[in-house]
Amino acid sequence: MKIGLVSLGCPKNLVDSEIMLGLAERAGHSLTPDASDADVLVVNTCAFIESARQESIDTILEMAAHKAGGRCRRLVVTGCMAERYRDDLRKEIPEIDVVLGTNQVTDIVGALDAPQPPSLAPAALRLPVYLYDELTPRHVTTPAHYAYVKVAEGCNYKCAFCIIPRLRGRYRSRSIPSVVREARALASRGVTELLLVSQDTTYFGNDRGERGALARLLRQLDEVPGLEWIRLLYLYPTTVTTDTLRAVAECDKVCKYIDLPLQHASDTVLKRMRRPGTARSYARLVAKIRSTVPGVTLRTTFIVGFPGETDREFEELRRFVEAMAFDHVGVFTYSHEEGTPAGRLKDDVPRRVKLARQRAIMSLQKRLVAAANRRKVGLRVRVLVDGPSPDHPLVLRGRTAGQAPDIDSVVYLTDADPETCRAGTLVDAEVVAAKGYDLVARPLAAEQTP
């Protein structure tokens, strides 16, 4: 059969989607990017915040329409929303044939052509234990030169706003050899940038009693032939260790890039969020990161409008963002989630106030980045070419080691030869202009490296 899959949400969810595609291929099915050409459609959903749930519902309904007026004869829904609302989904959208939770990724093949198996018990009756390894089939859907590798599953933290531990279970790490073997396999297929992801990447190995495992993993990955960049995403502030920072600083291939979701900087809001740390401890951590990893790029995310957030508490956050001068900042408006501790609180910050606070932080960040980018004009940078720009097909687009795909700003390459600046190529370039969050650079032809 021809299988079409729509993957929503984060890169961690994308890895699950790629595994489902790999399992389908191994079972003899073919894959199609065209929903109208698929015999079976799979939607891997996200349920992290309200907007993600709405996107999931809209996509399911869009795919369901293909059953009524197209080739599709089967609709399978998977992922976090399926885990959270499996009974409601099947009741409200009868076009759905099978619902698989987060612990049932490897059940996808049976779900493609059989009724909902009786063995697929409700999530509440199943202990989440699923964890893929390097032997699991996987069809990578990212551009050929980079890939995500999920080093762990689940989360042990109980942040008041987050439903993920209920959907994904407790933290469980893969072994170092398993991750390294997968990295070698990906590098042998042309992957040059490896992005390590999990709910809390700096906790890697702790659940297995392997303190310092992440630093050891980075040092072993640094020796993998073919890899050029190794990037860490989703680092939890209380599990960032000196050993990890030293490995980031000392390993040639590890990007000097720290993704550190802090969520807020008011002590009282952090306490209500059930987040460890304070504004002062976060500031000390940022200073330690910058002193240990010279030239580091820092990325973070914040939530505004958490229940009870006052003007004073928001101002504490705004001042913190200004003082820290992060390289990349993302701001979410608080989404009231049932089943979370915060869901029992009154959602008392009006939506218009949430949006105004989000705009205020992002406006501040835009000014900070604009000033920082102007100082980069004239500098020489190393750029990984991603390919033609979706907005300007005649212009090539790439990233520095301080820019992760999809979530950060980019570098536009002018006067670039598409033959020598192919996707996946590392190019030395000179920054010639700043354009908002992005940079414009001109390749230095004599310095191009395949």
Image (cartoon, rainbow, N blue to C red):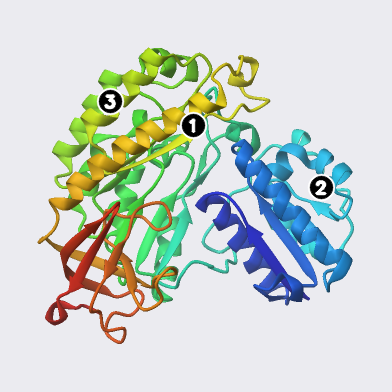
- Residue 54, visible in the rendered structure: yes
Please name the residue that numbered disc 3 is placed on: 320
**Which numbered disc flags the more N-terminal residue, 1 or 2?**
2
Q: Are marks 2 and 3 in contact (CB under 8 Å)?
A: no
Q: Which quadrant is the N terminus positioned in? A: bottom right
Element type where label 3 sits in the image:
helix
Element type where label 2 sits in the image:
loop
Amino acid carrying label 3: it is Phe
Please tell me how crowded label 2 is: few (under 14), some (14-19), or many (20+) other residues with Cα within 10 Å: some
Residue 140 percent location from the top left of the image: 53, 68
Q: Residue at x 24, y 48 (%)?
A: 248
Q: Residue at x 43, y 68 (%)?
A: 391
Number of callouts in the render?
Answer: 3
Q: Choose top left, top right, bottom left or bottom right for residue 125.
A: top right
Closer-to-camera residue (299/215): 299
Please tell me how crowded label 3 is: few (under 14), some (14-19), or many (20+) other residues with Cα within 10 Å: some
Please name the residue that numbered disc 2 is placed on: 120
Q: Is residue 331 above or below residue 177?
A: above
Residue 230 percent location from the top left of the image: 32, 58
**Which numbered disc flags the more N-terminal residue, 1 or 3?**
3
- Residue 260, visible in the rendered structure: no
Amino acid carrying label 2: it is Leu
Q: Residue at x 29, y 67 (%)?
A: 412
Residue 222 percent location from the top left of the image: 27, 59
**Which numbered disc flags the more N-terminal residue, 2 or 3?**
2
Element type where label 1 sits in the image:
helix
